[in-house]
Image (spheres, rainbow, N blue to C red):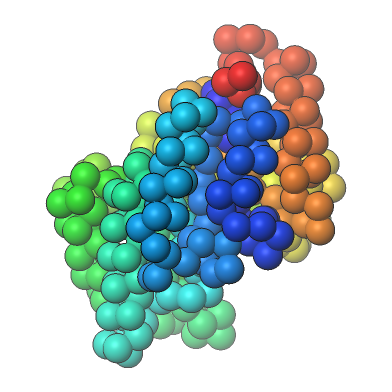
């Protein structure tokens, strides 16, 4: 299993090019890029920026696994047609930027629902399905993949929900980003999520939070059993790339520490079950 980095924690610290360059210098070669201003604007970023990002990644032999929109900016599950259309258009822009940069896929969340209206989830799933299908078809036409992520604020917040949704033959090529912190936030043991979704998982996000909270903090700062999660990932989803996604005042240092933290875990597990490494 390779270890990469998400740039979410860097969105107010530096732009995408500077962030990727710094992480590449530190030895990371697998990435997920947060596409939100001021870090990277998927709506109005000049073509020259995409060319520079692509050249940077290709020159280092690095892989951009996915572009990710901030879930707070869009809602594919909205019952307001204009809001849902805005979200679809945002993902269409993201797909275009992914093709320009050479990203493997775009990350799509399962919309947003009101925490006080859980009974509305069933009514929202139909509109979300239709909007998601439009995005999948557009991505296929552009030669870009689609990854769906478990998010606590979304309609598909746990592994069983995602598995049922992806049973639709129309989504046979859609893969999963499984986030262990997001799983813990809804009370799902990450070990169970990895077992349920298995080979559909493309990326595994790792971070930590205290019990009962949702923080995406540094590894070792919370109550999530990272060792058990990584062991389950290695057994059930060995094809997945592990992506460090930490939100903190010191994202670069904490991303480096996370890599060392996981190397320490790997050193204590049987080699046949966990082979965490980074490519350099």
Q: Is residue 127 above or below residue 191?
A: below
Residue at 55% over, 26% down: 2
Q: Is residue 37 visible?
A: yes
Is residue 258 or residue 102 the one in the foreground? 102
Q: Is residue 274 above or below residue 156?
A: above
x, y (%) of residue 4?
Answer: 58, 35
x, y (%) of residue 6?
Answer: 59, 47
Is residue 216 or residue 169 the one in the foreground? 216
Q: Is residue 76 visible?
A: no
In the image: residue 168, left or right of residue 47:
left
Residue at 45% over, 46% down: 52
Q: Is residue 70 above or below residue 58?
A: below
In the image as oriented, which residue stretches furthest toward the right?
Answer: 221
x, y (%) of residue 190?
Answer: 59, 43
Q: Quadrant of the N terminus?
A: top right
Is residue 50 or residue 176 the one in the foreground? 50
In the image: residue 275, left or right of residue 160:
right
Residue 85 placement: quadrant = bottom left
x, y (%) of residue 244?
Answer: 64, 42
Residue 24 placement: quadrant = top right
Q: Is residue 107 above or below residue 31?
A: below
Residue at 56% over, 85% down: 116
């Amino acid at each position: 299993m390779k270890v990469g980095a998400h740039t979410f924690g860097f969105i107010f610290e530096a732009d995408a090019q500077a962030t990727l360059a710094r992480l590449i210098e530190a030895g990371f070669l697998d990435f997920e890029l947060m596409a939100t201003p001021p870090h990277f604007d998927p709506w109005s970023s000049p073509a020259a920026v995409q060319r520079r990002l692509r050249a940077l990644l290709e020159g280092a032999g690095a892989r951009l696994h996915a572009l990710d929109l901030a879930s707070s900016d869009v809602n594919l599950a909205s019952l307001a047609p204009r809001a849902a259309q805005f979200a679809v258009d945002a993902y269409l822009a993201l797909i275009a930027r992914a093709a320009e940069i050479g990203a493997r896929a775009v990350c799509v969340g399962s919309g947003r629902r009101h925490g006080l209206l859980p009974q509305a989830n069933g009514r929202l799933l139909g509109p979300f399905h239709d909007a998601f299908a439009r995005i999948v078809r557009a991505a296929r036409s552009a030669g870009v993949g689609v990854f769906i992520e478990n998010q606590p604020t979304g309609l598909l917040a746990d592994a069983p929900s995602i598995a049922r949704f992806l049973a639709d033959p129309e989504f046979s090529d859609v893969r999963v980003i499984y986030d262990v912190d997001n799983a813990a936030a809804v009370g799902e043991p990450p070990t169970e999520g990895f077992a349920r979704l298995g080979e559909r998982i493309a990326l595994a996000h790792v971070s930590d939070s205290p019990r009962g909270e949702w923080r995406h903090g540094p590894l070792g700062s919370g109550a999530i059993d990272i060792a058990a999660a990584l062991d389950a990932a290695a057994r059930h989803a060995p094809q997945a790339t592990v992506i460090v996604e930490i939100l903190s005042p010191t994202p670069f240092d904490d991303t480096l520490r996370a890599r060392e933290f996981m190397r320490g875990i790997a050193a204590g597990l049987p080699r046949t079950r966990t082979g965490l490494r980074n490519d350099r």
